[in-house]
Image: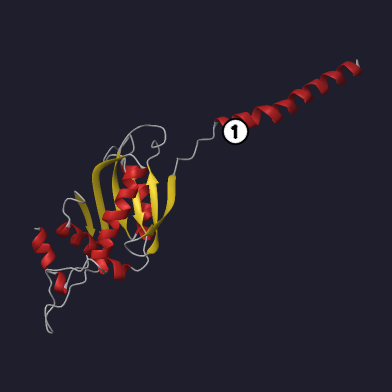
Amino acid sequence: MRNRYSLTSWRYALIAVLTLLFGIPQLAIAQLDALPVHNDKAILLKSKVLSEDRTLWVHLPADHNSTTNTYPVLYLLDGDSHFSYASAMADFLAGYDRNRIPEMIVVGITNVDRGRDFTPIHPQANSFETDSATVLTTSGAGRFLRYIEEEVIPYIDSHYRVTPYRILAGHSLGGLFALYVKETKPELFPAMILISPAIGGVNDHMLADVN
């Protein structure tokens, strides 16, 4: 009788151990939700316009690699400051349960010298006055616009599935640069986001010109 009870006890103990080994991990795995997909890349461009290496941060929609969809592109000035939250916000607003904006590619244009790159440089009209109607294209904002138009946009257009709709976003000096782009090349970016643009002095005329 004792042997029969002993055998039964061992049988129950074996079932309990097997349940712990195989049942609980499967249950835990079944309850684990996958993390959201983050398609972020860092790109190094050897810029001939700027004569220096520049970095782009690129965020792709989650379904970019599994569909043939095309996307508008949001270009972010001061990308190293705004890329993380801006790309997350773009994904959030484009989510299926919100559908406030289309899915889009976000390109963060990181800084080397924002004061140098974002400020329009005007030539001297004479010894006393600056020619505010002219911006040099060999330095300052004029040269940086050439970098974006001739190198950044062609790279993005040739490496990703994009629509012709581009948005340029800039804050402070970046906002001043974006306003300069709208005045100089209005067709390059159909939409602009200007946040507290640093407009003043010789650049005051830009607002009136855009309006």
14 w.r.t. 96: above or below: above
Residue 148 on image: x %, y %: 29, 56
Total marks placed:
1
69 w.r.t. 134: above or below: above
Tell me if residue 187 can be seen: yes
Viewport quadrant of the C terminus: bottom left
Looking at this rendering, what residue extends furthest in the bottom direction? 127
For this rendering, which residue is in front, 8 or 69?
69
Instruction: Tell me which residue sits at (77%, 22%) in the image.
Output: 12
| Disc 1 target residue | 28
Viewport quadrant of the N terminus: top right
At mark 1, the secondary structure is helix
111 sits to left or right of 119: right
Res. 184 image quadrant: bottom left
191 sits to left or right of 63: left
Tell me if residue 196 can be seen: no
Res. 30 image quadrant: top right
Residue 16 on image: x %, y %: 74, 26
Kind of residue indicated by mark 1: Ala
122 sits to left or right of 144: left
For this rendering, which residue is in front, 88 or 58?
58
